[in-house]
């Protein structure tokens, strides 16, 4: 039985900068739902579309340590309990991540099939997708290392390509040996690839036996296997999460499984996949995947358009009016307005890099920050004061903490708050408030059955988020 087990491995790394300003380091693309008609995030849809596969186990999820509570909450929302949530202290590309998953896989089972999936892809034909995965399992059982090549629909210069020894067939689902992986080509080369059925887009989806991929990595990059084994040696367990040994994992090479193994092994095959796949990697691909009106416009939020074509407008709060424009992407969040030519959306990454390089926080952080107990939104701030809206889920509690440079006022807007200040507890209801003096040990809880919403006003010589000393915490954040 354990030989036939299918263990999904979900890779949640990446900051999704090409979908800025919605996707940022603090809350990247894989945790977003771009379509307002679709409540589930990309990560949630990645797992839900696997329903129906035989012998499937709960997933192993590999994510950034900073996003661990977002992952746990999104899994809870869809009633999936992960086998593990493995926390990477920093990204080391797919080869180390897949090595870790294989090592964990053979700890749990004798030799499971590993289905490696990125958490941020869109797939429209799920029934056909599952059939291709089932075919991949047949090859995996025969010790092949399977990657899935997307049947090209256009001369894309934003994707990598895979060249196979034999052309794919529209009538037969058959694997072919891999010749090589090709980086993103220019338009002329991509046009040539489109007309040659030996070329498919590189999806980044893989399927293989845990022992088969480990043997190949051991043969080609024994240092990766050695370092990954050592990074797992001590069981750094924290609630639902497992941490790696940070100094050891830092030594791992930063290399993809494509170049570490797949283009060197003689066991690699590519299986064609024509399932309406997209990596949703930029605003143009978002526009292509969303429903549009008769003029080709995709609209979300408060938007009025006149004489406007083939554009994407998304507003979180303010009214946007478009008049006499074409091929635009307009995204308005509570702190950023993006106006871009739709065909230049690949270049947004350059803007984000500029913002980060110059320390402009809008480049990497949302005003809305998620925490395991709920979230907060920074509304207004200057150097010596800040105003936040804080929302705490029923039954949740913030850490017992102290600030060295600021005092705080809490005003309850709705719900019930339990406020602890220097071991004294009080209950606050709507329109009631409390003052937390600088240097006081304090804690906020929601003892009620509805969400607690309050206004926090900070004032002091420094109001940065790092002015916090934690004494107790339900979520294992005393190190942070």
Image (cartoon, grey):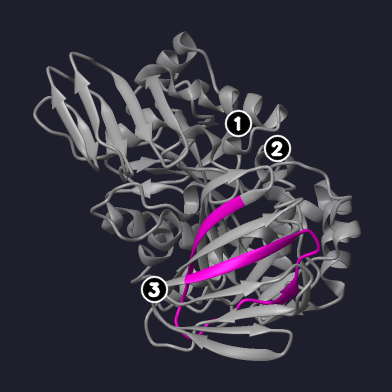
The residue at the point 37 percent across, 66 percent down is 48
Q: Report the side of 99 relative to 250 (left or right).
A: left
Q: Quadrant of residue 51?
A: bottom left
Nearer to us of marks 1 and 3 is 3
- The CA distance from mark 1 to mark 2 is 8 Å
Q: Secondary structure at mark 1?
A: strand
Per the image, the residue denoted by label 2 is 259
Percent of width and height locating residue 460 = 72, 54
Nearer to us of marks 2 and 3 is 3
Per the image, the residue denoted by label 3 is 78
- The answer to whether residue 228 is above or below residue 170 is below
Looking at the image, tell me whether mark 1 or mark 3 is earlier in sequence order: 3
The N terminus - image quarter: bottom right
Question: Around disc 3, counting alpha carbons within 10 Å, would you say few (fewer than 14), some (14 to 19), or many (20 or more)?
Answer: few
Q: Secondary structure at mark 3?
A: loop
The residue at the point 68 percent across, 45 percent down is 257
Percent of width and height locating residue 329 = 34, 26
Percent of width and height locating residue 137 = 48, 62
Magenta span = 386-411
Per the image, the residue denoted by label 1 is 181
The residue at the point 66 percent across, 72 percent down is 436
- Is 190 or 231 nearer to us in this picture? 231
The answer, for residue 8, to whether it is visible in the render is no
Percent of width and height locating residue 476 = 72, 77
Query: Dots 1 and 2: beta carbons under 8 Å?
Result: yes
Question: Around disc 2, counting alpha carbons within 10 Å, would you say few (fewer than 14), some (14 to 19), or many (20 or more)?
Answer: some
């Amino acid at each position: 039985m354990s030989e036939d087990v299918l263990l999904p491995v979900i890779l949640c790394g990446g900051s999704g900068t090409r979908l800025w300003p919605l996707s940022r380091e603090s809350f990247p693309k894989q945790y977003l739902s771009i379509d307002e008609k679709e409540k589930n995030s990309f990560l949630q849809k990645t797992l839900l579309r696997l329903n129906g596969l035989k012998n499937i186990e709960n997933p192993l999820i590999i994510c950034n340590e900073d996003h661990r509570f977002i992952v746990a909450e999104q899994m809870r929302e869809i009633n999936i309990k992960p086998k593990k949530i493995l926390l990477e202290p920093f990204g080391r590309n797919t080869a180390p991540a897949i090595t870790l998953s294989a090592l964990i896989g053979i700890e749990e089972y004798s030799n499971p099939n590993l289905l490696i999936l990125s958490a941020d892809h869109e797939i429209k034909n799920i029934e056909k997708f599952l059939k291709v995965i089932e075919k991949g399992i047949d090859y995996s059982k025969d010790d092949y290392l399977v990657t899935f090549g997307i049947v090209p629909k256009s001369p894309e210069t934003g994707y990598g390509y895979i060249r196979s020894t034999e052309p794919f067939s529209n009538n037969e689902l058959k694997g072919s040996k891999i010749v090589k992986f090709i980086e993103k080509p220019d338009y002329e080369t991509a046009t040539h690839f489109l007309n040659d059925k030996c070329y498919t887009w590189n999806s980044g989806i893989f399927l293989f036996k845990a022992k088969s991929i480990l043997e190949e990595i051991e043969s080609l990059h024994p240092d990766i296997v050695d370092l990954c084994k050592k990074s797992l040696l001590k069981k750094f367990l924290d609630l639902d999460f497992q941490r790696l040994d940070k100094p050891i994992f830092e030594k791992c090479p930063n290399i993809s499984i494509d170049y570490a193994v797949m283009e060197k092994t003689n066991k690699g095959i590519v299986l064609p996949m024509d399932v309406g796949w997209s990596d949703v990697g930029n605003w143009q691909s978002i526009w292509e995947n969303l429903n549009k009106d008769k003029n080709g416009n995709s609209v979300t939020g408060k938007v009025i358009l006149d004489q406007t074509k083939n554009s994407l407008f998304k507003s979180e709060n303010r009214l946007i009016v478009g008049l006499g424009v074409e091929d635009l992407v307009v995204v308005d969040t509570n702190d950023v307005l993006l106006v871009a030519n739709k065909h230049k959306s690949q270049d947004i990454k350059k803007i984000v890099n500029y913002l980060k390089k110059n320390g402009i926080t809008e480049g990497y952080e949302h005003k809305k920050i998620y925490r395991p107990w709920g979230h907060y939104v920074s509304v207004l701030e200057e150097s010596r004061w800040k105003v936040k809206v804080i929302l705490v889920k029923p039954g949740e509690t913030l850490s017992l903490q102290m600030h060295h440079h600021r005092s705080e006022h809490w005003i309850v807007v709705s719900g019930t708050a339990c406020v602890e200040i220097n071991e004294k507890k009080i209950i606050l209801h709507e329109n009631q408030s409390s003052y937390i003096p600088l240097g006081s040990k304090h804690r906020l809880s929601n003892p009620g059955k509805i969400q607690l919403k309050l206004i926090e006003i900070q004032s002091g010589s420094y109001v940065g988020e790092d002015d916090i000393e934690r004494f107790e915490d339900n979520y294992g954040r005393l190190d942070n």
